[in-house]
Image (cartoon, rainbow, N blue to C red):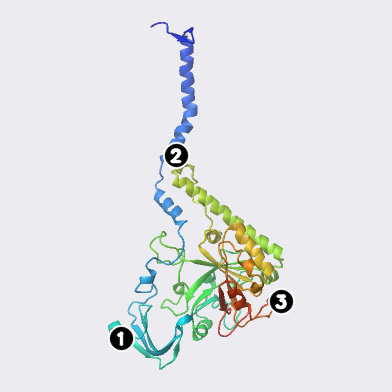
Amino acid sequence: MSKLAEQVGGLRVRQNPKTTLLLVVSFFITTTFFGIPLLSKHSKLHHRPLHADEILSKCKALHIKPGPPKDFASRTASDRYVPGTNATLIRNATIWIGASEGTYEGGDILLDKGIIVKVGHISKADLPSKYNVINANGAWITPGIFDMHSHIGVYSAPDLQGASDGNSLKGTIGPWLRSIDGLNTHDDSFPLSISGGVTTSLILPGSANAIGGQAYAIKLRPTSERSPSSMVLEPPFTLNSSATSSLLPHRWRHMKHACGENPSRVYGDTRLDTQWAFRQAYNEARKIKIEQDDFCAKVDAGLWGDIPAEFPEDLQWEALVDVLRGRVKVNNHCYEAVDFDQQIRLTNEFKFSITAFHHAHEAYLVPDLLKKMYGKPPAIALFATNGRYKREAYRGSEFAPRILSDAGLKVVMKVTRNIVFRMDN
């Protein structure tokens, strides 16, 4: 048909060959210049990079909460057990059970593969083939003391030049610092603490810095390797981990904060300066966390072409990002009500919790304030014998533990530094 005609709305329209050519050219231009972005976007949605599984695993690991493995309560050997070590049977002991159970007189304790297997009356049927026997002759046996505020190894006993590694003097904020990097496990404070019944210590950085750095829980018993790393109780994945997968439950991490007199005295700051330093640091960590969450949201949606070439992270701030993800127990050196108030506001601004306020002399004056902490109220770790030794400790009270306990807050009694021979800070 040489001439094409259409009936449109009652009008007779004749097709012009020039118009047809113009439509074809317009379609080609539209497809060429406007279709490519659409096709490109479509290809972004489906193109998986070679390391996609690694990225997916990293994103999934962001949501893993810390804690012991599921089989922890049923384990038959400690991860610190030294193969070839015989079991130990302690006979005829006065065993302090604690809580409402009181004591067990003339009792036995069986230890095997680093586990307390049984407490009470041990029969022959309970015993392994090889074991050593200790007759306690009625002596007391108590649970080992967990020292939750310790500086042994990062400060020396006695004090010596060149052996004071508890604090950095390079700046108020230092979440990237680690107490294990200054931990001298050959210091005399170790046998002295063991003689006082301490078996486990949380080695905190000092309190000169607002954020002093990362802390590590260690077992005080010597190891064949004789190194600080071999004594770490629950190493995070970044430190000599025995975990086979980053998707297994993460070990708890620990961090030291401090407010009040110490950071102000060391750096010549006021409380206003210190709190601003806290907010700056947490804001930096929050920005990285948001970038990571946005990155992983695109990965989950399959938008591989829209993600940056590298996962957004920064070694300097990664520990503080983990605080915001609820994977770090923050221990805060804090004495006065004004400091509790600013720290609790900080937790609500940046959505993280503080595990415990340490020293906390004025905590008994403001129990309702403490309950406003983001997440849940902190534990209050009070000095057992040390008080009124500097201005911010003047309002301490011997009645504080009872007042706080009656208010529904968890109370822990502690000392500081090297438990059996020195208390300061």
User: Which circle marks residue 261 in the picture?
Assistant: none
Task: Tell me if residue 390 comes above or below residue 5 in the rendering.
Answer: below
Residue sticking out furthest to the bottom: 137
Q: Which residue is mark 3?
A: 391
Q: Nearer the viewer, residue 83 or 376?
A: 376
- Please tell me which residue is depicted at 49% across the width and 15% down the height of the picture: 22
Mark whose residue sits in front, 2 or 3? 3
Residue 319 screen position, x and y as percent: 53, 61
Q: Which residue is mark 2?
A: 44
Q: Which residue is mark 1?
A: 123
Task: Tell me if residue 312 comes above or below residue 419 in the rendering.
Answer: above
The amino acid pointed to by label 2 is Lys
Q: CA distance from mark 2 to mark 3?
A: 63 Å
Mark whose residue sits in front, 3 or 1? 1
- SS of the residue under disc 1: loop
Task: Tell me if residue 103 comes above or below residue 303 in the rendering.
Answer: below
Looking at the rendered image, the quarter that the N terminus falls into is top left
Q: Please tell me in which quadrant of the rendered image residue 48 appears.
A: top left
- SS of the residue under disc 2: helix
Is residue 209 visible in the rendered image? The answer is no
Please indicate whether residue 36 sits to the left or right of residue 111 in the image. Answer: right
Q: CA distance from mark 2 to mark 1?
A: 68 Å
| Mark 3 crowd level (few <14, some 14–19, many ≥20, 10 Å Cα) | few
